[in-house]
Amino acid sequence: MADTTADAVEAKLRPADPKPPAILVPLVDSHCHLGDPTFEADRDLVIARACAHGVKRMVTIGAGAPLASNEAAVALAEAHADVFAAVAVHPHDAKEITEETYDALRPMWAHAKVVAVGETGLDYYYRHSPPETQRAHLRRFIHEARRTDLPLVIHCRDAFPDLLAILSEEDAGAVGGVIHCFSGTPADAVACLALGFSVSFSGIVTFKNAAALRDAVRATPLDRLLIETDAPYLAPAPHRSRRNEPALVRQVAEQVARVTGRDLAEVAHTTTLNAERLFHLP
């Protein structure tokens, strides 16, 4: 059971305050939520701190219905040269989607700094929306990605069999995209790769109980691997229980380097190229 005391809630909102590294490597945080209210008091400082840690570009995600979080993501991308946006509706909110939702999203997908359709997908862990509704809208978002020629950002939790079936049936590999914050098995990772998708890993790979996820990292070719924070969620060790932020994507890169026996510079360089290629970043 989660600790809901005032002290515990305050700790989760407290920033991790990472110290700048002595040697910078180029990094891209391929998935964060800079519009989240927990960044309201210091958002510009968070973005500046990311740059000071070598994170030169960030993809901020709009995911809610109603669409305020998507509008905020686009506004942040407009305001910051190093921030780009992805817009869609998270599967948690799939039951709130109407035709008007798609009508409102289409002009955003045409925006010069919107680089993906997402996040969309399936979440059978919480089931805030009925699975059949999630599946129907995932198919719609795949069609919209094909129409707009944008890659997909896919969320999947406890739903890989259905996700893989839909991606195959809809030929989503022709669109391409990334399975963000990957949480499946090594076999799931291989199956996603075979369908033409990249796989992105978050701070979860630093958790002590994430041995299977580290096996999935090893099963993913470096040229198909992205890194992310999913900030403000999932801060890597040793910052767990604190608010996550894009500067900490370096710790994900460091863990990938340890897990795969590669140099940090190689992991940083290749994952940056991967994000640039997938999202057509300048």
Image (tube, grey):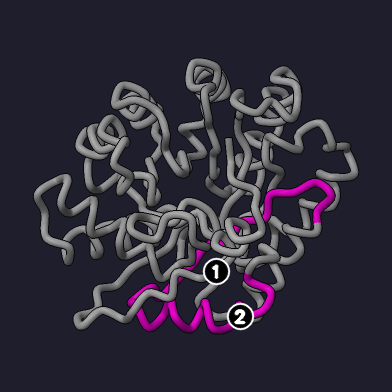
For residue 228, what is the image quadrant?
bottom left
Mark 2, Cα crowd under 10 Å, few <14 / some 14-19 / many 20+, is few
Question: Residue 58 magenta-drawn?
Answer: yes
Q: Which residues, given as a range, are shown in magenta?
A: 39-67
Residue at (48% x, 66% y) in the render: 245
For residue 33, what is the image quadrant?
bottom right
Residue contact between numbered discs 2 and 1, judged by CB atoms under 8 Å: no
Q: Position of residue 16 (x, y in %)?
A: 45, 69
Check disc 1 and give the amino acid type: Arg
Q: Position of residue 184 (x, y in %)?
A: 40, 28
Q: Which quadrant holds the C terminus?
A: bottom left
In the rendering, which numbered label is found on residue 190?
none
Nearest the viewer among 147 and 177 is 177
Residue at image mark 1: 14
Residue at (52% x, 59% y) in the render: 231
Q: Position of residue 176 (x, y in %)?
A: 47, 40
Q: CA distance from mark 2 to mark 1?
A: 11 Å
Residue 281 in view: yes
Q: Nearer the viewer, mark 2 or mark 1?
A: 1
Q: Which quadrant holds the N terminus?
A: top right
Residue 73 in view: no
Residue at (55% x, 63% y) in the render: 11
Nearest the viewer among 158 and 5 is 5
In the image, residue 225 sits, relative to residue 19, either above or below, namely above
Instruction: For mark 2, give the secondary structure.
Output: loop
| Side of 235 relative to 127 (left or right) | left
| Side of 101 relative to 131 (left or right) | right
Question: Residue 59 magenta-drawn?
Answer: yes
Residue at image mark 2: 42
